[in-house]
Amino acid sequence: MRSKYVAYIGSYSYTGSAKGITICDVDMEKGKFTKRTEVEVNNSSYMVASRDEKTLYSIADEGVIAFRIMGNGGLSKLNTKNIRGMRGCHLSVDKSGKYLMVSGYHDGKATLLSLNPDGSVGDIIDGVYDQGIGSVAERTFRPHVSCARMTDDQKYILIADLGIDQVKVFRFDKADGRMRQIDTLRCELQSGPRHFRFSPDRRYLYLLYELKNVIDVYAFHEEEDGDEVSFEKIQTISTFNEKDRDPLIAACQMRFSPDTEASHLFVSNAGINTISIYGRDFKTGLLTMKGSLPIGGEYPKDFCIFPDEKHIAVANNESGTITFLNVDYEHGLLSMSARELAIDEPNCICMVKCTG
């Protein structure tokens, strides 16, 4: 029997045209979504599912909301937790499902919260306000935390700040729940480090820059005693084809293909409204661009790769659409797989497998 999937699309709700989260049924064969219903959330700017896909977490004006994912993909609210800061822009869950990281663009704060056994959000464990100044008014003038993640072994937490052009490295002490800074990756001024991801084997770090529009690849090294870590830059590669160069390009999102070796990497670019496809050598960590093509919408703020790896759904924030693309990995091509879906100001997409 073929597995069923459901997709959740988070939107801003302040205009009244969207309620917050739109639940869609996924047609895996045709590579498209069909709207089912909406759930009220005040400005769902980002969502993430737990690794076991039993819980969905959404940013909201009130903090973070946890939902139990029902067997048919419906959502049942578990709780809401205040993060004692301004509304976040990014969420991540650790591999064990015990911790949730919230990134604060507006206040430059990274917040670490515990997760309860039932998936609900627990207490704040620790929080860090970034300090410092950048170089250009507003966007890169003051701290703007854009991404925070815990490593799968729960030893380290990395925090990217595109406002002050730094990625800070913390050791996480589970005994007292404290984050202690041990290193800083100082990026080029006005580069805007936005998102990062470790390879599945944690040997390589991929860092995406919103303003510089490149991906830096680092080899990650850890001393045997775990007291020191180091990052060796081994590659810098553009997020777009040179022929598409434009001063208004802004790299938005970066995701691995869902296969176990993460053999491909995808990046979306606003301004020129493209997605770039890279092949990834899992032995060396190096990337090779295979293609970069239009996505049929404006401001591809987020996207998700279908579990069959044959299709991509793109959340186009400014055009208010979800566009659906076929992926040709061999030739690095993207082609429309279905009609676009109208969703007001979509911010993010999350897809999970139904259990019922």
Image (tube, rainbow, N blue to C red):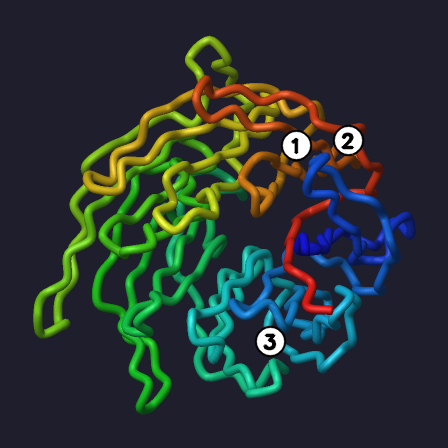
Comes first in the chain, label 3 or label 2: 3
Q: Residues within 10 Å of mark 1 (few under 14, many from 20)?
A: many
Look at 39% across and 51% down and name the residue there: 260
- Asked whether the residues under the numbered discs 2 and 1 touch, taking CB atoms below 8 Å apart as contact, a structural biologist would say yes
In this image, 24 relative to 230: left or right? right
Q: Check residue 319 in the rendering and tell me which mark sits there, or answer none.
A: 2
Which mark's residue is nearer the viewer, 3 or 1?
1
Look at 29% across and 43% down and name the residue there: 187
Comes first in the chain, label 3 or label 1: 3
Residue 245, x across and y down, in percent: 48, 14
Residue named by callout 1: 299
The residues tagged by marks 3 and 2 sit, at their Cα atoms, a distance apart of 31 Å
Residue 123, x across and y down, in percent: 55, 87
- Which type of secondary structure does the marked residue at label 1 adopt? loop
The residues tagged by marks 2 and 1 sit, at their Cα atoms, a distance apart of 7 Å
Decide: is 46 above or below 324: below
Residue 24, x across and y down, in percent: 79, 51
The residues tagged by marks 3 and 1 sit, at their Cα atoms, a distance apart of 28 Å
The residue positioned farthest toward the top in the image shown? 243
Give the camera-side residue of 300 and 210. Answer: 300
- Which type of secondary structure does the marked residue at label 3 adopt? loop
Give the camera-side residue of 250 and 254. Answer: 254
Comes first in the chain, label 2 or label 1: 1
Q: Which picture quadrant has residue 224?
A: bottom left
